[in-house]
Amino acid sequence: MSQPHDRDHRISVIVPVINEQEQLSITLSHVRLTPGDELIVVDGGSTDQTPDIARKFTPDVLSSPPGRALQMNLGAAHATGDILLFLHADTILPPEGLEAVRRAMQSSQADAPKVPGGAFRLVITPATPALRLVAWGANLRSRFAQLPYGDQALFVRRSLFEMLGGYADEPFLEDVKLVRALRRHGHLVLVPEAVQTSGRRWLSEGVLYTTVRNNVIVGLFFCGVAPATLKRWYRDWHRRRG
């Protein structure tokens, strides 16, 4: 039987959701906790069966105003583990995902700083040639530019997350902003095991269009454009595409 982990090794998995009844049971069924770990689902006002589905997997189902950053910060405030793992509702962890995170966060040497956090390698499903190319680019970006995104299941030391003030209260790109802050505290780990993220966003609007638009938005963010402005532009582009 697995033994409980001490506090330094316990993982809190935090899943922000809004109207994810079609995907959520698949995602949560792949979260394989060991004693001492926990699963926290934070609902942002779903009007479908999402909260009821979540309660089949965990008693820790919280209610929050909508907004991914708000929801994840609320989950972190209720978490008890020393490692926080933020999982999107359409992202599936690999079978040994939590153990891989534990190994990565314990890999620091006595004469080196602790690993601040990291993310998983990305696979996008269905694995069409175009989506395989997108995932390849994302993994290159994560490895060499130290810039993983939220759909790669970001994880971070709880103490550092709290010191940084959690996710910024922004309507957009809160994951990129957190990653930029984490990089100032050490080298992020890219776990070789892969998460599987749904390609529904790319397929609904077109793989090339979605990829170019996303890269333009992130580039504008790095140039100093405010996330609120980028969110408005994103919605405008989405409506025109629709």
Image (cartoon, grey):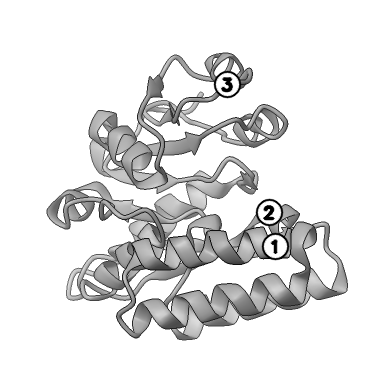
Answer with the quarter of the image where residue 81 lies. Answer: top left
Q: In terms of secondary structure, where does tag 2 sit?
A: strand
Q: In terms of secondary structure, where does tag 3 sit?
A: loop
Q: Is residue 116 above or below residue 75?
A: below
Disc 3 or 1, which lies upstream in sequence?
A: 3
Disc 2 or 1, which lies upstream in sequence?
A: 1
Answer with the quarter of the image where residue 72 lies. Answer: top left
Q: Which mark is residue 96?
A: none
Residue 34 position in % (x across, y down): 47, 30
Q: Which three-letter amino acid code belongs to the residue tagged 2?
A: Gln
Residue at figure coordinates x 37%, y 71% from the top left: 188
Q: Nearer the viewer, residue 131 or 143?
A: 131
Q: Nearer the viewer, residue 169 or 86?
A: 169
Residue 239 position in % (x across, y down): 65, 58
Q: Is residue 239 left or right of residue 204?
A: left
Q: Which mark is residue 47?
A: 3
List the residue tagged with mark 1. 123
Count all numbered tags in the image, as a single digit.
Answer: 3
Q: In terms of secondary structure, where does tag 1 sit?
A: strand
Q: Residues within 10 Å of mark 1 (few under 14, many from 20)?
A: many
List the residue tagged with mark 2. 196
Q: CA distance from mark 2 to mark 3?
A: 26 Å
User: Which residue is at the far left?
Assistant: 163
Residue at figure coordinates x 57%, y 35% from the top left: 31
Q: Nearer the viewer, residue 81 or 79?
A: 79
